[in-house]
Image (spheres, helix red, strand yellow):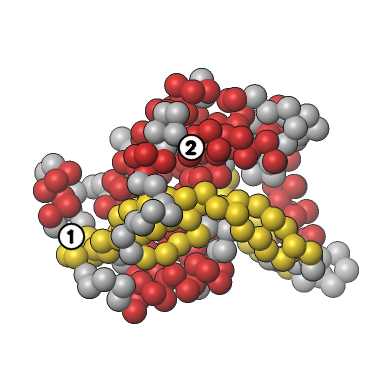
Amino acid sequence: MSSRDHQRTAQTVERNPPQALAVVERLQAQFPDAGVSLGPADSAFDVPEAFWADGGAGIATGLAYQDCFAIGMTDRIRAAHLIAFYGRQLSVVLGAFHLGAGFQVEIAGIRFEDWSRLHQDREVVGKRYHFRLDRLERPLEVGSISAFERRFTAHLAPIITVLKKRTGLSSGAQWRLAADALAGAFLELGRALGDEARGMAEALAIVKRRGSRLFSEELCYEEITASDPAGGERLSRQYRIRCGCCLYFRTEGGSFCDTCVLLEPADRRARLAAHLMQNGGA
């Protein structure tokens, strides 16, 4: 079945039904680092093709913004951070509609906007992607490739091509980071929806499907447990274990992330157990 025929198996729903509005409210409350609104794109948004075009504002601004996170970045490191940064926000927004309401949506427009939040009683200023979403559908799944995976990879493919040309970071490295972003976002979304197991299962169905651009042998989830030495309380939490590397360790003063694929398993588990204890299981 062609992608066009596959699209025809979807049922278009009324514009902005209550379930969709509820997803938007949940995203705004629980995942404010990703902007979202419903409706056709207006002059405040660029269509994805223009936003991410070679030489477009999306690429130049996105790469430059990554310098906020580390000193001494090269273009390849900026690209790694950008695809991870964007992939996470894309996964959260599209995944929230998929997991929370069974909707697939069309990205009608994108903008990169200023936003701020309170962290430990002080305002933190940064930027986020704002997704303008239109044409909500309930897909009737046909074949082994889900409607979510099809749309997610179709959206990212031209971005990854441009970033490879612009920075030299390989397509494979970028797809691994995109898979990490999806798996991490689905874990967070499942936790927020009260069904962590489903969030992980839906992600694994994509990243463990042979033939998928997001396929990975290494990417997985691991349950980490630790005991509070003071109170004896036993803590447990699921973590997404990466298959890609953001290259942060190559920046000035940089180090390995706690879930980095380059860490030895014992070192990684010790780091995650310490994180679990420090944050009281959260």
* Residue 231 falls left or right of residue 197: right
Q: Is residue 28 above or below residue 53?
A: below
Q: Residue furthest right?
A: 230
Q: Residue furthest bottom?
A: 18
In this rendering, the label closer to the viewer, 2 or 1? 2
Q: Residue at x 39, y 74 (%)?
A: 21
The count of marks equals 2
* Residue 226 falls left or right of residue 191: right
Q: Is residue 112 above or below residue 264?
A: below
Q: Position of residue 11 (x, y in %)?
A: 17, 65
Q: Which residue is mark 2?
A: 57
Along the viewing direction, whichever of 258 and 100 lies nearer the viewer? 100
Q: Earlier in the sequence, mark 2 or mark 1?
A: 1
Q: Badges 2 and 1: C-beta atoms under 8 Å apart?
A: no
- Using the image, tell me which numbered label, if any, was put on residue 40: none
Distance between the Cα atoms at labels 2 and 1?
A: 33 Å
* SS assignment at label 1: strand
Residue 219 visible (yes or no): no
* Residue 202 falls left or right of residue 115: left
Q: Residue at x 30, y 48 (%)?
A: 151
Q: Residue at x 35, y 76 (%)?
A: 19
Along the viewing direction, whichever of 43 and 112 lies nearer the viewer? 43
Q: Which residue is mark 1?
A: 10
Type of the residue with mark 1: Ala
* Residue 20 falls left or right of residue 121: left
- Check the picture and name the quadrant holding the N terminus: top left
Along the viewing direction, whichever of 86 and 127 lies nearer the viewer? 127
Q: Position of residue 116 (x, y in %)?
A: 66, 60
Type of the residue with mark 2: Ala
